[in-house]
Image (tube, grey):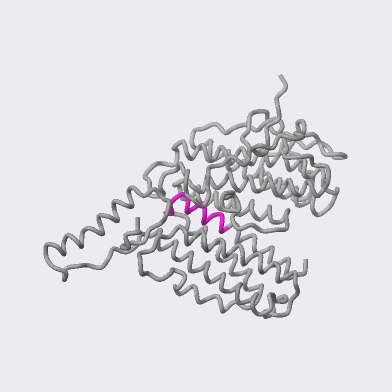
Amino acid sequence: MRRRPRSISPGMLDSGRPAASAPPGRPARSSQPAGSSQPAGSSQPAGSSQPAGSSQPAGSSQPAGSSGAGAAFLLADSTRSADTSPAIAALQKALAAEQAAIYAYGVVGARLPQGSAQQAAATTDWVAHMRARDRLTALITARGATPVPAAVAYELPGRVQTAAAAEALAATLEDGVAQAYLAVVALPVSSLRSFGAEQVRAAALRAQAWSGSVQAFPGLPATR
Amino acid sequence: MADDGLVPGIRGTGPARRTLLIASAAALPVLLTACRGVEVLGTPPPPPADVQTLRSAIEHEAALVASYAALTATGGSAAPGSHAGTAGGRTAAVLAAVLADHRQHLAQLKSRLVEPAGRSSAAAGPAAGRGGTIQTIAELEQAEQAASDRLIAELAGLPPTLAQLFASIAASEATHVPYLKAARRGR
């Protein structure tokens, strides 16, 4: 049965690409375990080797707007343990966002000039996402849950036929990743909260590098 | 919850428990006074730790706003490592954009704090006066990084939505560093 590609971002349905293929002129990359220290810029980011399965759009994290409404998490001084379902749910969302980013960076890298600094940056970012994916996988597994698998393919927000479109896609991806990690920040577990905040910051820095601009509230759509 | 003018609080963080605590703390001196006279009125309870954290964040954000405002007012820019007033439109535009971000940060942070009536703004605290000591873009970069690190270090114990705001602002301030650096280097 043919799987339908998952959407990278909510409401973005146009021009989904088929399951990621090797970028033009580049060999397909074998599955790269995150944390395996793939040297930045040494190869083409592909993201084509994710296991089949479902995935969550990157931008579907918990509400995090300035109004403070809608937060479904406990207060920070709660006595709940780290293994409660909100923690698993938030980590799974972040994992799904990372999986989508890993896939999409394959497309980004394929559309950037071969051997360029931009392509090297895409590789660096791709590796960073794989490392984060593995960290999330370990966190989820340690809590007795099964990490969500990645999809075979994802629908991209639009056609990515130029380097400029690829850079815009990378910035969009990072915004979604930042948003997903804000759900982790809302957890009442100090270590997870710090981890989530560091990842929000890392995603915002990558987004800034791709877009060349800054935003007041990365990951918080309601306050932009 | 603190609109009664007694104890500061944080807006939008699940008022039930805090409201009860504040109401209890506020009612106690009144009850004692009624029974034993005004001389037994004690000092108000100290604000909760998260309120103090929020006040501190507001002070530091106000200091950053003051720094950017001062630099933009004196010519809008600083050449690499130099004092303000020597750079061009690109740097001025960057400073203005970052200043706009900080003003939004400050507004959002202030919106979370409910101060008792008559209390002056938290921005009047000691950190607010530090803005004038920053005179170069390189110093701004350092201040931005320090601000980002400080916000992340203060996440523990905050209500969830306030923690999210802190994390987002920390991320924004971290992105100001390369943004400023690029402007300083003319890129």
Looking at the image, residue A5 sits to the left or right of residue A217; the answer is: right
Image coordinates for residue A112, horizontal then vertical, percent: 82, 47
- Residue found farthest to the top: A1
- Residue found at x 59% / y 46%: A179
Does the magenta run of residues contain B165?
yes
Q: Main secondary structure of the magenta part?
A: helix
Figure quadrant of the N terminus of chain B: bottom left
Q: Is residue B39 left or right of residue A52?
A: left
For the record, the magenta segment spans B157-170
Give above or below for A221 relative to B39: above
User: Which x, y percent locates residue B32?
Assistant: 16, 62
* Above or below, comparing residue A170 to residue B146 in the picture: above
Q: Is residue A173 magenta?
A: no
In the foreground, A17 or A45:
A17
Q: Position of residue B166 (x, y in %)?
A: 51, 56
The quadrant the C terminus of chain B occupies is bottom right
